[in-house]
Image (spheres, rainbow, N blue to C red):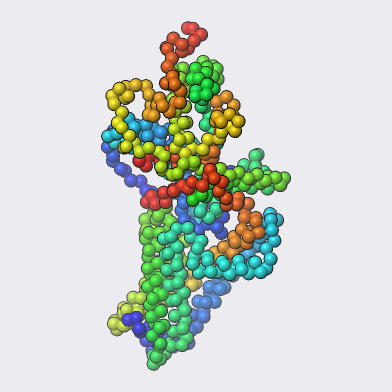
Amino acid sequence: MISINPFSEIGAFIPSVMMQIYVVAMFLLVIGATIFDVIHKKSAKYFFNNSVKAKKSATRNVNSGEKASLAFKTATNEVLTSSEFCSTRRRLAHLLTMYGFVLFVIATAVMIFSYSTPGSVTPSIWPLLWHLGAAMLCLGGYWFWFFIRVDVAAEGNKWYRVMRADLFVLSLIAMATFALIWSYLLSNQVAVWQTLFFVLFIISSTVLFGGVLWSKFAHMFYKPAAAYQKRVTKADGSRENLPEPADLPEKFGLGIKREAPRHY
Amino acid sequence: MPTFVYMTRCDGCGHCVDICPSDIMHIDKTIRRAVNIEPNMCWECYSCVKACPQNAIDARGYADFAPLGHSVRVLREEEKGTISWKIKFRDGREKNFLSPITTQPWGEKIPKLAELEVPDQEALDSQLLCFEPDALNVETGLPVISKDKLKEGVYY
Amino acid sequence: MAKRKTVWEDCDILVVGGGMAGTGAAYEARYWGRDMRIICAEKANIDRSGAVAQGLYAINCYMGMQWDENQPEDHVRYARNDLMGLVREDLAFDMARHVDSAVHKFEEWGLPIMRNEETGRYQREGKWQIMIHVRVINQLLLRQLVIQ
């Protein structure tokens, strides 16, 4: 199952061009909806006003070289290692899901654009990465859904209680699950069911990429921007009016261990 | 005025939900971030402000003592055992405060009651509370008063 | 978010509320009743429960008997004066004579109390108040007590 490129099998029924058009359309939908969301929520204006306010209370100047290094640090810490999460579980689940998604999407794009005809010989790395990405997505996604989701962990709601904020996570998990099931059925040549799951896979991925305007998809672009801005405020001394971290006089410095909130 | 959440800083961890004594910090349904669902009931205890690991919560003061242009922010660092406040007045003055949270290592100095000796019947019958009379730090022990000293000067 | 669950418990002592008073009562109850089943029922998170959820900056009533600052009779007179005679003087006396030991034990257990630099005594703010640093959380202190 893992070595078969499902898109080359499907290439017998669906022309490659259609698949490629679909991928490009999803990509454009994401970009377009994110830009629309930014304009609609006036996020750019908000961030701009914030940076103006921060400059007013800044204690030192941050030159562009330093800003570039801050951007680099944001990319390596907050983006690549998800360092903003304070809870290890959440961080792990997020890393699993994030890298799973990246692998899955890249492998899908490569296989659709280069190896989607029935006769093509796919280098074995790509189906492997595709399945690995989907598996990581499923692992991280289900772990998050059942245990880590704050509605369940902190508010005591049941795991099956769904709200609009779950659109992104649910469609992500659905897409990965249906992809894996579809691939399994393909490799076992179960005709009717494999079509069904292929259709479900397409539906869930369309919901995922098409629902950007209503889901939290776009937050994956906003969060790094916010993290970069936070680093700039720390560097220029304004710190959003927060006090500086304490340097410990001798009589202080005895830490507290608060019990982690896991009361449900 | 109640607390509010900076949505760009909140990552939906739920610490504020867990700690609010009035049970008014909850998770928003549309964006899964924290939100104060009942500003009228907020008594600004700043528990959520202190509990947020991302410092994403702030409180708006009432206009009579905290007019626009002020800023009150707190940073509670549990590993260091300190709490710092930065207060900016709207005429530009700034005050900074730094306080310890506790002076003894966490959980060590409080005696485990299971290890102390069980009070006998005489101690139970006496008027002393636990750790008295030593904790009073006076040689004369627990003060007593005779009944006729009470309600002096009161007549019916 | 209906999360109503009825829990049936048997206990010897039930303390309703886990603020300053409740956790103190639970601790005291455990000291005197080692084998008893004591339940402290608190609706909020016990880290921040009760009227002092936000932390305090002062202890409002401390005698200072160890330094001859005040005596319980003075406090009774103060309360009677304040309330125009409508006080239970015996209860006020009892509370006043016990408060010192609680403050001393708290300080021993980690409460940061501000000290007057010259005299070394607790820093007063008026006749009855002493100033403490626990602008943060009183409960965390008491919570350690209760987790035993």
In front here: B21 or C118?
Answer: C118
Left or right, C78 with reference to A51: left
Q: In which quarter of the image is the N terminus of chain B?
A: top right
* Horizontal and vertical percent position of residue B51: 50, 49
Q: How many numbered callouts?
A: 0
Q: Is residue A114 visible?
A: yes
Considering every residue shown, the one lying at the far bottom of the view is: A119
Q: As drawn, is A106 to the left or to the right of A240?
A: left
Residue at 38% across / 85% down in the picture?
A124
Q: Where is residue A203 in the image (x, y as percent from the top left)?
A: 42, 74
Q: Is the residue B87 above or below the residue C68 in the image? A: below
Does C90 sit above or below residue A35? Answer: above
Residue ID at (69%, 61%) = A61
Q: Position of residue A38 (x, y in %)?
A: 59, 66
Instruction: Name the foreground residue: B117 vs A197.
Output: B117
Q: Can residue B5 be seen in this view?
A: no
Q: Quadrant of residue B2?
A: top right
In the rendered structure, the answer to whether residue B95 lies left or right of residue A85 reads right
Residue that protrudes farthest toward the right in the picture: B91
The residue sitting at the top extreme is: B156
What's the residue at 31%, 37% (across, down)?
B114
Residue C118 placed where, x, y %?
A: 60, 30
Residue C92 against residue B48 in the figure, above or below: above
Q: Residue at x 31, y 83 (%)?
A: A187
Where residue C41 sits, quadrant-wise, is top left
